[in-house]
């Protein structure tokens, strides 16, 4: 029992500086996304995006990105949707006021055709950057431009399907 208490106190002693940082510990972003996969669909898609960022310090963070995109109704398939989930790292530059960042992550995507009862999933990656522009103490506007790539329908298509993702929204900062 004494060993467990000692280990708990030791962990708390080394973890406490992480709680005293001058940046938010957690940032939640919600917004609109616009994504194009020209190899599969001629039109751009729109949808809902969210990201959760855990700041390890003022420069480095862990970021989770989730997007739900709708590509409209396709001939032969009907309604077409993409669910995208990526987790990775983020590097921040905070000296200017607005936070400039670059991120790279891996994850996957699920392309759904609900009316046809079909779909395909694939490993994917995402890389890009953006800016968080603060407008209140706990809020910021976010603009993110990134490239996402997937290997959908690998048996029919040669190579990966990629496209440009542009998203914008609001960020809620917590634990500053």
Image: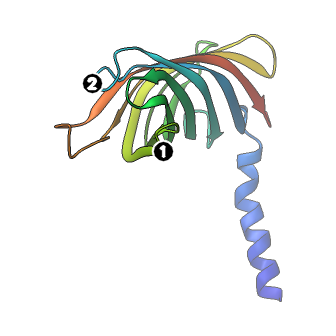
| Apparent side of residue 115 relative to residue 172 in the rendered image (left or right) | left
**Which residue appears farthest toward the left when viewing the image?**
158
Circle 1 packing at 10 Å, graded few (<14), some (14-19), many (20+), is: few
Answer above or below: position of 7 versus 36. Answer: below
**Which residue appears farthest toward the bottom when viewing the image?**
1
Answer above or below: position of 133 versus 70. Answer: above
Front-most of 141 and 25? 141
Asked whether the residues under the numbered discs 1 and 2 touch, taking CB atoms below 8 Å apart as contact, a structural biologist would say no
Residue 138 horizontal/vertical position (percent): 80, 22
Q: Quadrant of residue 31?
A: top right
Secondary element type, mark 1: loop
For residue 107, say whether it is visible.
no
| Apparent side of residue 22 relative to residue 59 in the rendered image (left or right) | right
Residue underneath mark 2: 39
Front-most of 152 and 22? 152
Residue underneath mark 1: 117
């Amino acid at each position: 029992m004494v060993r467990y208490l000692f280990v708990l106190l030791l962990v708390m002693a080394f973890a406490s500086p992480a709680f005293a940082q001058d940046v938010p510990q957690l940032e939640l972003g919600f917004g609109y996304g616009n994504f194009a996969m020209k190899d599969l669909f001629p039109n751009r898609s729109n949808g809902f995006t969210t990201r959760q960022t855990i700041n390890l310090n003022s420069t480095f963070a862990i970021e989770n990105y989730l997007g739900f995109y709708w590509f409209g109704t396709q001939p032969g398939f009907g309604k077409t949707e993409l669910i995208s989930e990526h987790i990775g790292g983020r590097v921040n530059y905070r000296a200017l006021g607005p936070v400039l960042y670059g991120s790279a992550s891996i994850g996957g995507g699920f392309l759904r055709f609900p009316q046809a009862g079909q779909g395909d999933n694939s490993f994917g990656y995402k890389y890009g950057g953006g800016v968080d522009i603060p407008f209140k103490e706990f809020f910021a506007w976010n603009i993110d431009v990134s490239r996402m790539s997937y290997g959908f329908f690998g048996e029919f298509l040669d190579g990966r399907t990629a496209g440009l993702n542009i998203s914008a929204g609001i960020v809620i900062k917590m634990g500053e």
